[in-house]
Amino acid sequence: MKSKFFYGVLSLTLLVGFILAQAQPADAIAAWGRKYSVSCSACHRGQWDLNKDGQEFLRRGHRYEQEKAGPNVNEHLSFSTKFRVKYSETSDPRSTFEHHAFAIYTGGALTEQFSYFTEIYLHENAGKPATNTQPESDDGGRTKLAEGFLQWTSSDGPQYNSVRVGQIMPSLIHRFGGGSRLSYARPLVLTTEDTATANRQAGYAFFSRDYGIEYSRKHDDVFFAAGLVNGGKGKASVFNSTDTDNHRDWYATADYTYDDNGSMVGYYFYDGNVSKPSWAGTAGAVPSKFKRHAVMGNYILDNYKLTGFWAWGERRFLDGGTKPKLKLYYGQIEAYDLEKYAKMSWPLSAYVRHEFIDYNKDNRASDIVRQNVAGLQIEPFEYGHVVIEWTGKRDQTSSTVVDQNATVVELQYLW
């Protein structure tokens, strides 16, 4: 109880102190806002969630129509920092301060048809402890190229072709939790790797940035993309790595935007293989091929957003073993412009999410994960926010149940 009380008081103090310290008029906005002389709301709701114009700006290569490169570096360069206070309630509770990351975002038009984007972390606290007696990073800070590509776009107007080359993530996954989002954490459905069986694992997650090439076609409100990527690393969290075999994974996406708010339905397919599964860190691991399917959609109103994501697929082991099938889904509700009910002057948003993960749904002894998430986001100034997120997670097998509750307060600016 003392730890909970200390954490609660500490979080509240940090939150109030940050808001009071930053609640003054701002003189500048993030790089693209500076470039076009618009506020963040031109492309975002709740600072981070993309609206319809933001989706188009992203897919056109972080540019508008008929745009050329500008001479000012500050129109192409932004900086971001994340500070966190974390509390995890398990059989061995722990709490900590964390300066999680410092990153540079840069991108925009190079010519009338070429553009670029790069997200690079000069520092990210990304290490994982072997036990609860070790620090969370154990000096595991790293630099990381999160995303970086060169893009060619054929023409202006509502119909165009484009090609991206570099370290890429499908824009459909970006739209449904992989990129700009209201919540602190991405859905576990996107980030949890398929490692259900020790020597038989794909090591794939929907949130995965990989070296490769992508072709896309936009025709009015319909968007199609297909990509060829390295894949096959046996671990989705391995970034910035070249391949070690002669196989390539491929994916395809299709989506339709059906209203002026940017509401969307989409389909995602991924065909992959793990030909050298020792990358997964498990001796004697069995090579496999796998497929992933996902359907997703959202419905956006002026002050609310409903999102659903459902995925399925299977793995085929090359030694003739069984074919585990998976089922994953999440549903999320977001509410915006709540400050009028809280009688506060800074924009306030809220969200709740339920998630389910089963990577071997025909084996009742396999691990099943259920998670509930609730959070608030406060925007004390135009380039920053405070997110308070509560998480309740249950890992369950036929013989064990492990519950873990966590609270995170994150302070972030992107200027």
Image (tube, rainbow, N blue to C red):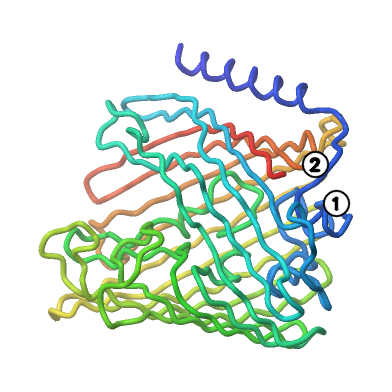
Q: Residue at x 33, y 41 (%)?
A: 128
Q: Position of residue 400 (x, y in %)?
A: 25, 43
Q: Position of residue 55 (x, y in %)?
A: 72, 68
Tag 2, which secondary structure? loop
Which is nearer the eye, 91 or 156?
156
Circle 2 Cα neighbour tier, 10 Å, few/some/many (<14 / 14–19 / ≥20): many
Which badge, 2 or 1, is on the more N-terminal residue?
Answer: 1
Q: Residue at x 27, y 50 (%)?
A: 397
Which is nearer the eye, 132 or 358?
132
Quarter the C terminus occupies: top right
Which is nearer the eye, 94 or 43?
43
Q: To which residue does mark 1 refer? A: 39
Name above or below for residue 33 compared with residue 7: below
Q: Is residue 392 left or right of residue 351?
A: left
Q: Position of residue 390 (x, y in %)?
A: 55, 36
Q: Is residue 81 left or right of residue 47?
A: left
Pointers 2 and 1 in contact (CB under 8 A)?
Answer: yes
**Numbered tag placed on residue 382 in the rendering:** 2
